[in-house]
Image: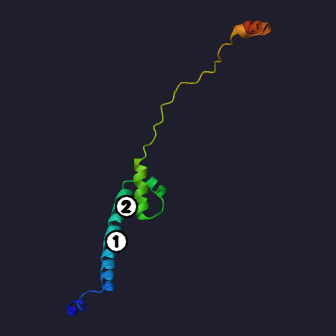
Amino acid sequence: MPDELNNTNAPTAEQIRATLLAELATERAALTVAAEELLTAELAAIPESLRALVPDVTTAEKLAWIRKAKAAQPQTVPATDQRRPTNNPPPPDVASLSPIARIAAGYNKN
């Protein structure tokens, strides 16, 4: 039984840690390449004139910013009245005018 505990072929904690770190580094490199390819595809869909608006941050933050910008719906502006504006003031209420203002209003009528 003591021979089983002292097995020299068993990996040490440092060897296991190094193996796991190497696997994680490989996975991270693959994910980084995939994220860069996704970012390139997303940037290709953006018009050239608007690409300068994308902030200069990490790849993940750029992807999040682009998705948030795509989700924002542009507000539509209602159509405006194309006629020329009139400059006619409303007629004064003659009942509320003073007597002199009533006389003046009567002379101004054409």
- Residue drawn where x is 33% and y is 82% of the image: 18
The Cα–Cα distance between marks 1 and 2, rounded to whole angstroms, is 16 Å
Which part of the image, by quadrant, shows the N terminus? bottom left
Q: Position of residue 65 (x, y in %)?
A: 43, 55
Q: Residue 64's spot in the image, x, y percent? A: 41, 57
The image's colour scheme reads: rainbow
* Residue neighbourhood size for the residue with mark 1, other residues' Cα within 10 Å, grouped as few (<14), some (14–19), many (≥20): few
Q: Amino acid at mark 2?
A: Leu
- Residue at the right extreme? 100
Q: Is residue 58 above or below residue 77?
A: below
Task: Work out whether residue 81 or residue 29 is closer to the camera in this orientation and state it.
Answer: 29
| Residue underneath mark 1 | 28
One can see residue 108 in this view: no
Checking the image for residue 39, the label placed there is: 2
Q: Amino acid at mark 1?
A: Arg
Res 68 label? none
